[in-house]
Amino acid sequence: MTTELRRLRNYINGEFRDAADGRTIDVVNPATGEVYATSPLSGQADVDAAMEAAAAAFPAWRDTTPAERQKALLKIADAFEERAEDLIAAECENTGKPVELTRSEEIPPMVDQIRFFAGAARLLEGRSAGEYMEGMTSIIRREPVGVCAQVAPWNYPMMMAVWKFAPAIAAGNTVVLKPSDTTPASTVLIAEIIGSILPKGVFNVICGDRETGRAMVEHPTPAMASITGSVRAGMQVAESASKDVKRVHLELGGKAPVVVFEDTDIAKAVEDISVAGFFNAGQDCTAATRVLVHESIHDEFVAALAKAAAETKTGMPDDADVLYGPLNNANQLKQVTGFIDRLPAHAKVEAGGHRVGDKGYFYAPTVVSGLKQDDEIVQNEVFGPVITVQSFRDEEQAVEYANGVEYALASSVWTKDHARAMRMSKALDFGCVWINTHIPLVAEMPHGGFKKSGYGKDLSAYGFEDYTRIKHVMTSLG
């Protein structure tokens, strides 16, 4: 007896549709390793249809008032709360995440973020009108950019969907959103929820693989391409978008340094850092994965961190005692395993370093010490439940090691010395610096990096403004 697979579909112009040519992709539950659904493998015809729908809907949506867009987004936020259990079920099957943590750590901020952008729709700021030339008055208009092609990642499928569509729609744009090929279920459900609230064509979802995403970015219709993903993917998007000078918004990888000074409360720091490093199986571009600790407390800190790792649990979504679930897919398990298998002889695995079980893609909480600055695992993003530890002798070397990678998204400093914390926050070349904490985000503050971590901001008024364009209007007073 076989169980019928769930059939996910694209959402284009207010209708759910299969791919035009009928092709599909198997969708795997990473907690079991079993196929539970199929989703469309969208091709050029599907991309054309979605872009046509978004373009046709744009003039009317652009001309809505901020109050109308706010009202729609507030309805969407309310609907997310009403359908919270459905969203949780879809997301946990998508990703294998723990149900309880998804309920407490993802639904509330998602709803809050939608409501923030609902308010932001009515609070666009700019320079006041004035006479900067005799006899002439200048005004600044902020306008939506147009159709936005958006690609969301698999680590936080539904939350990253919110980070994409909420500011774009609040600003008066229309959207074509593609979820990752491994995690389409919650995004398709979001389309169902939004479909009864927004006009046809304002929000569209197409499922598919990298080629689908490439076709979206290369399509002549979108005025903007936005992606959250790997550095390689971001480079490809930027290159493709450059051919017709599309605006690009990139939130890419990270390798967050966690700088721990000798005056730190070790027990408290270890508790917080282990959670920030292992949460969501370390599949977070801001994860606390690269600890730099002062040499005077190095051994004590490593021992405490290894103990915390040994006490951290991974397991099935319905287990309320686990901190994280599986890695997202077989390729990601292979990547994490490869980093550990290739460790240099001078490295030491203090905890973990192995797969857990033989079903699904679970990996043990892992701590690696004895590393050098140019080691592969220090320089490259692992994107798994792996925390590396290095020692430093002084503040200057801590800054050198922290900044000595190609990523520049997030960082943290752990010290009781206020002046030192301020010096470090200035010296660290990262888009976010946390002090005596790591990973909290709020809707009002920007999230985004420098260097190969990309450009553009998510969340905040800055993220909202990224989805607008500036027009100067000058009129003669004569």
Image: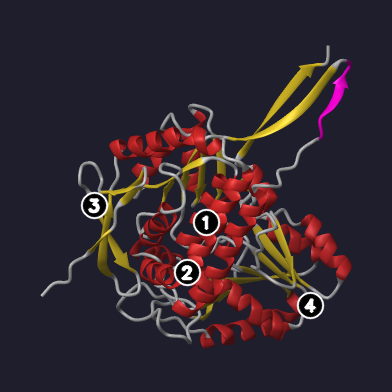
Q: How is the image coloured?
A: secondary structure
Work out how far the residue at label 2 is from the one at label 3, CA to CA, in angstroms: 30 Å
Work out how far the residue at label 1 is from the one at label 2, CA to CA, in angstroms: 16 Å
Tell me what residue is drawn at x 82 percent, y 34 percent: 128
First reached walking from the N terminus: tag 4 or tag 3:
3
Amino acid type of the residue that numbered disc 1 sits on in the rendered structure:
Val
First reached walking from the N terminus: tag 3 or tag 1:
3
Say which element carries label 1. helix
Left or right: residue 450 compared with residue 105: right
Tell me what residue is drawn at x 48 percent, y 40 percent: 237
Say which element carries label 2. helix
Task: State yes or no: residue 301 in magenta.
Answer: no
From this viewpoint, is residue 452 visible? no
Amino acid type of the residue that numbered disc 4 sits on in the rendered structure:
Glu
Residue 361: quadrant of the picture? bottom left
- Please provide percent x and percent y for residue 429: 72, 53
- Residue ID for mark 1: 162
Q: Which callout, 4 or 2, points to the residue nearer the camera?
A: 2
- Residue ID for mark 4: 262
Camera-nearest residue between 292 and 408: 408
Residue 84 in the image: above or below residue 466: below
Highlighted magenta segment, given as a residue range: 128-134
Tell me what residue is drawn at x 41 percent, y 54 percent: 196
Q: Check residue 82 in the rendering and tell me which mark sits there, or answer none.
A: 2
Local crowd size for mark 1, using a 10 Å CA cut-off: few (<14), some (14–19), many (≥20) = many
Work out how far the residue at label 4 is from the one at label 2, CA to CA, in angstroms: 48 Å
- Residue ID for mark 3: 24
Local crowd size for mark 3, using a 10 Å CA cut-off: few (<14), some (14–19), many (≥20) = some
Amino acid type of the residue that numbered disc 2 sits on in the rendered structure:
Glu
- Please provide percent x and percent y for residue 359: 30, 77
Q: Are marks 1 and 2 in contact (CB under 8 Å)?
A: no
